[in-house]
């Protein structure tokens, strides 16, 4: 046995583990897509059917007048985009202030912001419910955006702080020597340099807001209902509408795949931007 044999065995074992993990992760999505193309009877067939005539009626029903699923997808898209924009903007500004400014209590304030990220949403949802009823924000897209941003601004702050710390302060000083104000330096010099990091942060915020259930479920009832909360209505008192449920889940995944498809170039650069350099 040569010295390379144990190393080669290690590579094979690692590859096998990765393949097994990939199959385990992808198979539920594959099964969901298959189930969305079956009838209710075929879904429960034993053994499972892998060769069958696809049935697209559940997809056409989703966008019909009875279900009108495009309304809930639009709500989710508006809320996710609004939440990402607000969270990344305010989080980036706060991160810039913490990395460039020195003031009393800054470390304690940063830890307080971080603690908000770990606060369970169920803890504050009922106080928010009472406040929203008083201010007229119940069942509005703005209300859900503000609620989601409560949890995502601290997340954006800490993620952007890691990217901004890698930029030398000499960049800011050189810009201000040339006559730029602090705000102009941040907007015209710093933001373009950390744009990949902002893309990563926005992607995480978008996914959280798109998939979030509890807050949207309690704070909406009709006009601002999101796609995840609409999925619960496919469950009746006596049975679950499995074909429409699976097809709605598949449709809900499409915007996420499209987003990562267009942002993958920025995501790769952004994930390596805050890496520790040796």
Image (spheres, helix red, strand yellow):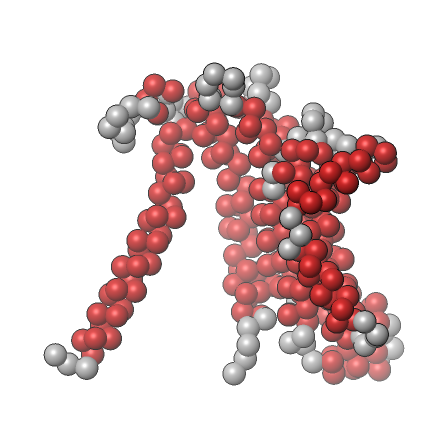
The picture places residue 239, in percent across and down from the top left corner, at 46, 18
Q: Residue furthest left?
A: 1
In the picture provided, is 165 more to the left or to the right than 255?
A: right
- Residue 249: x and y in percent read 49, 34
The answer to whether any part of residue 88 appears in the image is: no
Residue at 71 percent of width and 65 percent of height: 111
Between 179 and 57, the one nearer to me in the picture: 57
Q: Is residue 169 left or right of residue 199?
A: right
Describe residue 261's horizontal placement relative to residue 132 as left or right.
left
Q: Nearer the viewer, residue 196 or 143?
A: 143
Which residue is painted at 57% across and 65% down in the image? 270
Q: Residue at x 72, y 49 (%)?
A: 149
Query: Is residue 68 among the parts visible in the rendering?
Result: yes
Quadrant (top left/top right/bottom left/bottom right) for the N terminus: bottom left
Viewer-nearest residue: 116 or 211: 116
Q: Residue at x 74, y 57 (%)?
A: 89
Q: Position of residue 98 (x, y in %)?
A: 76, 70
Q: Is residue 133 above or below residue 111?
A: above
Q: Position of residue 10 (x, y in %)?
A: 26, 70
**118 vs 216: above or below:** below
Figure check: 247 above or below 18 = above
């Amino acid at each position: 046995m040569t010295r390379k044999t144990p190393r080669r065995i290690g590579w094979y074992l690692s590859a096998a583990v990765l393949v097994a993990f990939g199959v385990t992760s992808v198979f539920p999505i594959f099964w969901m897509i298959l189930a969305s193309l079956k009838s209710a009877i075929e879904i429960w067939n034993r053994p499972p059917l892998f060769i069958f005539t696809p049935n697209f009626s559940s997809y056409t029903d989703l966008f019909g007048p009875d279900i009108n699923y495009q309304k809930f997808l639009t709500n989710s898209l508006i809320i996710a985009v609004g939440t990402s924009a607000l969270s990344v903007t305010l989080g980036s500004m706060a991160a810039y202030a913490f990395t460039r400014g020195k003031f009393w209590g800054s470390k304690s304030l940063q830890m307080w912001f971080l603690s908000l990220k770990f606060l369970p949403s169920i803890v504050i949802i009922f106080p928010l419910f009472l406040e929203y009823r008083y201010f007229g924000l119940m069942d509005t897209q703005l209300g859900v955006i503000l609620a989601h941003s409560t949890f995502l601004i601290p997340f954006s702050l800490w993620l952007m702080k890691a990217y901004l710390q890698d930029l030398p302060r000499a960049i800011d000083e050189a810009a201000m020597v040339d006559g730029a104000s602090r705000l102009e330096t941040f907007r015209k010099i710093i933001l373009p340099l950390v744009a990949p990091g902002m893309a990563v942060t926005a992607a995480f915020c978008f996914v959280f807001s798109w998939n979030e259930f509890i807050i949207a479920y309690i704070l909406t009832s009709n006009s601002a209902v999101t796609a995840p909360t609409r999925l619960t209505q496919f469950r009746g008192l006596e049975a679950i509408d499995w074909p429409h449920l699976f097809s709605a889940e598949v449709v809900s995944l499409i915007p996420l795949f499209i987003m990562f498809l267009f942002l993958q170039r920025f995501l790769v650069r952004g994930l390596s931007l805050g890496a520790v350099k040796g």
